[in-house]
Image (cartoon, rainbow, N blue to C red):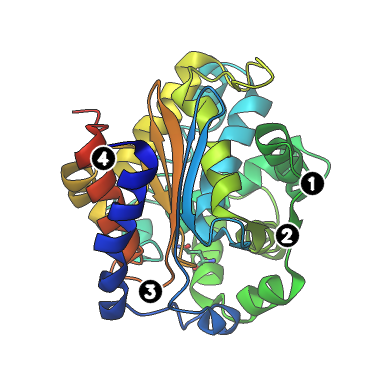
Amino acid sequence: MDIDDILEEAAEVARPAAEHGKVAGYIPEMAKLDPKSFGLVMCELDGTEHGVGDIDEPFAIQSMSKVFSLILAMQKLGTEHTVTDELWCRVGREPSGDPFNSLVQLEHEQGIPRNPMINAGALVVDDVLIDHCKDPDASMRELVRQLTGDEIEINPAIATSEGGASYRNRAMANLMADFGNLNHTVDEVLTTYNDQCATMMTARQLARSMRFLANDGIEPDSGEQILDAALARRVTAIMLTCGTYDAAGEFAFSVGLPCKSGVAGGIMAVAPDHSGLCVWSPPLDSSGNSLAGRAALHELTNRLELSIF
Ligand code: GLN
């Protein structure tokens, strides 16, 4: 059976799961998403692309932006050594076992977030980016352009909606500022973060953007070394252990690939030496991960034996 048929079948098996999930309602603009939207796409390293459903419709990347901001921070800091000195002393690398927007560990752990894939961790990474980029959001868009060949944009209505609903993120940023773990103002850091979350990309673009992580840090079309191979491995390790929050264990078990989700219902994944993947279906489970998305990735990785384990 060829890959296109397997994708079709995975989509068919997974789609009904969406009925048991809920579209993110805590950001008003996200509540408008159509629960029936569904797209599944695989971009192989040789440029071959396979897709089914809504793979060319832009949606807000939300927490998937946390991968791009981590990559950008690593690029700016340059080497494993400087990343250790300037980033890993301010944010950890352990799964939190808590929801992505939880505040509880921050107080106990002196304002050092568990990892860069939860909200508090991403706020610290953004604080680093403000130090190193003239315009961190523009730098992120440029990185994505390099990875996809496409220009992408921020949706201002979503960014504003995020800002109006960011009580928890503001509380985290304030707590971290109190512990001395932010160099910039809470407003500055939140604006950067909200704009990143409101970046619009299609499932196809997201899948393409993951190929370099499947290829030792080298973008396969241009041959450009986006990130040192050792640092690229760190990114995928963190995606695997922390990218889907308190469901990371379940994703490792049932999908077996480094993944990163977002509350608009996207999940992107890296199949080492093979492809970048993305699935989009807005209804979420209680951990904030797309329900049908996980089902589709489970089906696909099982059938194609893509699990890294
Ligand atoms: N913008 C969202 C938030 O900060 C992102 C969370 C997510 O996608 N998990 O709450």
- Looking at the image, is mark 3 or mark 1 nearer the viewer? 3
Q: Amino acid at mark 4?
A: Thr
Seen from the viewer's position, the closer of residues 15 and 32 is 15
Q: Which residue type does callout 3 highlight?
A: Pro
Look at the image and tell me in which quarter the N terminus lies: top left
Indicate the position of residue 128 as horizontal and vertical percent values. 64, 40
2 or 4: tag closer to the N-terminus: 2
Label located before the other in sequence (3 or 2): 2
Q: On the image, numbered disc 3 is attached to which residue?
A: 283
Q: Which quarter of the rendering shows the C terminus? A: top left
Q: Nearer the viewer, residue 101 or 229?
A: 229
- Element type at marker 2? helix
Residue 5 is situated, as x and y percent measured from the top left of the image, at 34, 46
Q: Secondary structure at mark 1?
A: helix
Residue tagged 2:
188
Between label 2 and label 4, give the one nearer the viewer: 4
Residue 301's label in the rendered image is: 4
Q: Is residue 93 visible?
A: no
Q: Residues within 10 Å of mark 3 (few under 14, many from 20)?
A: many
To which quarter of the image does residue 265 belong?
bottom left
Q: Position of residue 124 (x, y in %)?
A: 55, 48
Q: What's the distance in space between the residues labelled 1 and 4, CA to CA?
A: 34 Å
Furthest residue toward right: 134
Query: Crowding at label 1, few (<14), some or many (≥20) Cα neighbours within 10 Å?
Result: some
